[in-house]
Image (spheres, rainbow, N blue to C red):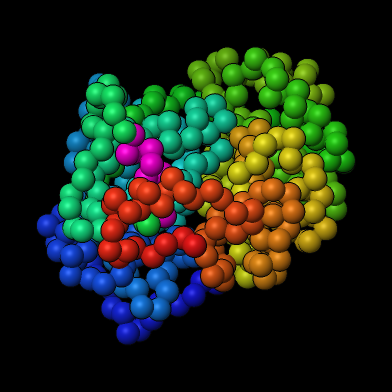
Amino acid sequence: MAPSASLSNPSLAPTTLVELQDSVRAAGRLLPRGGGTKPALSTPPDGVQCLELRGLSGILEYNPGEYTITALAGTPLQEVAEALAAHGQHLPFDPPLARAGATLGGTVAAGLSGSGRYRYGGLRDFIIGVRLVDGLGRLVRGGGKVVKNAAGFDLPKLMVGSLGRLGILAEVSFKVFPAPPAHATLRVSYAARDDALASLDRLRLSHLDLIALDLVPDAPGAYHLFVRIGGPAAVLPARLATLRNLLGDGESLTGDPEAAHWHEQAAFTWVEPDRALVKVPLSPHQLAPLDAALASAGADRRYLAGGSMVWVAWPGALPALGTLLAEQGLAGLVLRGESERPLIGAPQDRVFLSRITAALDPEQRFPQIE
């Protein structure tokens, strides 16, 4: 589904920070790749070398008492998740594709968060420090390894969604949270979009402590609302009863079936192999017209975080989706699929980013987004 890398441009594979710096200085143009789980973002075009970062892997510092972790950018998310779980902690923004081999650096560069962002916030809210190699091979640090840092330019947040176009992430630090001891999910089904959206709005405006609030369309025209809660196992039945009273019944998911549902969502097992995968941020008031257009085009979709983002599994050529999104005033990030550029849809103001690029990559070693 993604363009193939040029055979005339062999990959570079540094295993140390010094090798990474040397690779950047010696190369012409290059694009980093971690786990390769987002091929539309990590497959270099002709004339650009692939910079493999899986050799830059490992947890450098983890202080459970301070709720912070620092790891090299090529570290698999799953390795981080297992280390945190051993101390009852997790990355609350619920990063997708962990079990598929996604890495910390690739997740930051793509700016990807999962369903848990509804309760806790997105990746941008948890990154506290980075070290990166800029286009001149210089090692640059931003932020730190503890939650409290001196004020200044927030380079770590700038790297979220940078797509490897501003610098090569070498090291990333996050604050982490205690993981809930137990979870439960209420699934409520609706025969019409308007009814599902009414319940979605009711929950968004409530004061209920929800971990995730996802809307999943289902053929023909049905919609399922998945409401996830967490906490001590003893209190979850009463909280599920409160949700049922508000929404009018529903099916409870607990234990392994409940965990399996959220793992499947994060792994995109619902996306057919021949379909492109695109992330589209939106506002809840944009959901209804967008969903109607996507449904007419035969696209599968999953709405996360109370309707503030949608994953789109697109069945046709991506320029058609780009046109559809532009008509709605929206932009999408292509993770899988044939596309000349990673961003499609409504054009974005890139004046500020161009100034940052001029400072970090004056020789334009990293391919630009547009």
Residue 335 showing in the rendered view: yes
Give me the residue at 54% from left, 70% from top. Answer: 340
Task: Give the answer, above or below, for where 186 lies relative to 77.
Answer: above
Residue 155 covered by magenta stretch? yes
Where residue 59 appears, x then y in whole percent?
23, 43
Furthest residue in direction left, as rendered = 18
Does 296 lie within the magenta span? no
Q: Nearer the viewer, residue 190 or 315?
A: 315
Where is residue 69, by image quadrant?
Answer: top left
Rendered residue at 79%/61% (across/down) = 297
Residue 16's spot in the image, x, y percent? 15, 57
Name the side, left or right, on which 23 lies relative to 34. left
Whether 331 is drawn above or below 285: the answer is below
Q: Residue furthest bottom?
A: 8
Q: Is residue 176 left or right of residue 130?
A: right
- Quarter of the N terminus within the rendering: bottom right
Task: Note whether residue 252 is visible.
Answer: no
Looking at the image, is 361 positioned above or below residue 318?
Answer: above
| Part of the protein shown in magenta | 154-163
Residue sitting at 32 percent across and 85 percent down?
A: 8
Q: Residue at x 40, y 71 (%)?
A: 44
Q: Residue 304: horizontal and vertical position, in percent?
A: 62, 39
